[in-house]
Image (cartoon, grey):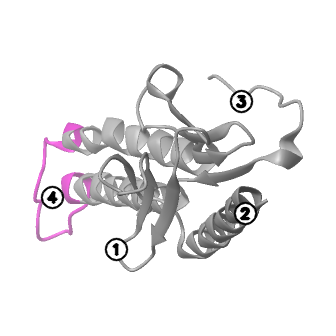
Amino acid sequence: MAYPKKIASPEKEIRFTRAAQGLLFLIAAVMMFSLSMGLWTLATSGTQFERPRLEGYAWTALLPLPLMAWFFLLGKRCVRHAYLIFTPLGIEIFPLFRPEKQMTLVTWQEIQDIDTDLPSKRLSLHYNVEKTSGVIVSLSPILPAQRQLLQHTVTAIRQKRLASTAT
């Protein structure tokens, strides 16, 4: 498994993970495990008066296990790896699959304005003043507490940019 590289100055960046999305995948993994245990129980346990309901089908308990493993690994990946990184160079946006190849970097020079809309869970990066082009990033994968931190970060960036353009 690939691990994040060491960063020269990590204090200059803010990382946001897909922790909210990862939690859903971990819950799905637990549900697949429960389904597997339920099938196993139905296939192997009976009473002295009744045979097991799925007698001879104990192998069906193995069917949900690959999905369980996949959901667990996906949930672990979402919790550990970054989704958005605010750096001095710009904002790095990582997709869920193949982030090392499909990562998007939006530099600060490209961004004319930046907005957060917490009720609709969106981060908007505008490429022009008219706000007709840009990138819209969903904030649903981020935990609500992290969304507040992200909004605070965006507010600080906007104030810093306004102060630098005023001088």
Q: Which residue is mark 2?
A: 166
Q: What span is in magenta?
A: 42-59
Checking the image for residue 30, the label placed there is: none
Q: Earlier in the sequence, mark 4 or mark 3?
A: 3
Q: Earlier in the sequence, mark 4 or mark 2?
A: 4
Mark 4 vs mark 2, CA separation in Å: 78 Å
Q: 130 left or right of 123?
A: left
SS at mark 3?
loop
Which of label 4 and label 2 is nearer to you?
2
What secondary structure characterizes most of the magenta part? loop
Checking the image for residue 4, the label placed there is: 3
Which of label 4 and label 3 is nearer to you?
3
7 or 114: nearer the eye?
Answer: 114
Mark 2 Cα shell of 10 Å, populated few (<14), some (14-19), many (≥20): few
Checking the image for residue 120, the label placed there is: 1
Which amino acid is tagged 2? Ala
| 93 is higher (above) or lower (below) than 160 | above
Which amino acid is tagged 3? Pro
Residue at 20 percent of width and 59 percent of height: 42
Which of label 1 and label 2 is nearer to you?
2
Which of label 1 and label 4 is nearer to you?
1
